[in-house]
Image (cartoon, rainbow, N blue to C red):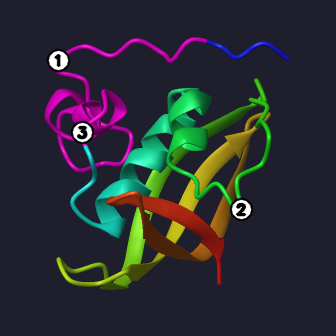
Amino acid sequence: MARRSPKPRTASSVCPCGRGPYQSCCAPLHDGKAAADPESLMRSRFSAYALDNSDYVLLTWHPETRPASIEADPSLRWTRLEVLEHSGGGVFDAEGIVEFRAHFSDGGRPGVMAEKSRFTRHDGRWVYWGPL
């Protein structure tokens, strides 16, 4: 399946992760800036899913656990993110944990995906390892 281009955003658009304007929140990470910590990376990955930016999702996935591809589901829309807890991920840490709930709509039916995720450093950047 061909990858869709990320949905366009304006400077005043609210970031899908809910932290503020997209251009000063997740856009810099989507444009190549390294995430400062696992929570920021997790938020940017949620926003990438919400914007159909599968290239970014794959780029920020650890190569040992990354799938070969991901397919967008046109009936699935990621609508809201709740970060419940985070630990580790400091300047001198090699890994961090983020627990979250990602709300979605699938064909108009609401749902929630809950996960406690592990993030590690790879080549000096934070990447998603997988669920705990």
Q: Which residues are magenta?
A: 5-33
Q: Secondary structure at mark 1?
A: loop
Q: Secondary structure at mark 3?
A: loop
Q: Are marks 1 and 3 in contact (CB under 8 Å)?
A: no
Percent position of residue 64, x then y: 69, 62
The kind of residue tagged 1 is Ala
- The image shows residue 68, relative to residue 103, as above or below, that is above
The kind of residue tagged 3 is Lys
- The image shows residue 86, relative to residue 130, as above or below, that is below
The residue singled out by tag 3 in the image is 33
Going by the image, does 9 lie left or right of 111?
Answer: left
- The image shows residue 114, relative to residue 87, as above or below, that is above
Q: Earlier in the sequence, mark 2 or mark 3?
A: 3
Going by the image, does 120 lie left or right of 29?
Answer: right
Distance of label 1 from label 3 (alpha carbons): 17 Å
Percent position of residue 72, x then y: 74, 29
- Which residue is pictured at 65% across the width and 13% down the height? 4
The residue singled out by tag 2 in the image is 65
Label 3, residues with CA under 10 Å away: few <14, some 14-19, many ≥20: few
Label 1, residues with CA under 10 Å away: few <14, some 14-19, many ≥20: few
Label 2, residues with CA under 10 Å away: few <14, some 14-19, many ≥20: few
Q: Quadrant of the N terminus?
A: top right
Q: Are marks 2 and 3 in contact (CB under 8 Å)?
A: no
Q: Secondary structure at mark 2?
A: loop
- Which residue is pictured at 38% across the width and 46% down the height? 44
Percent position of residue 34, x then y: 27, 47
Specify the principal SS of the magenta part. loop
Q: Is residue 57 magenta?
A: no
Kindly identify which numbered label has been placed on residue 11.
Answer: 1
Q: Nearer the viewer, mark 1 or mark 2?
A: 2
The kind of residue tagged 2 is Thr
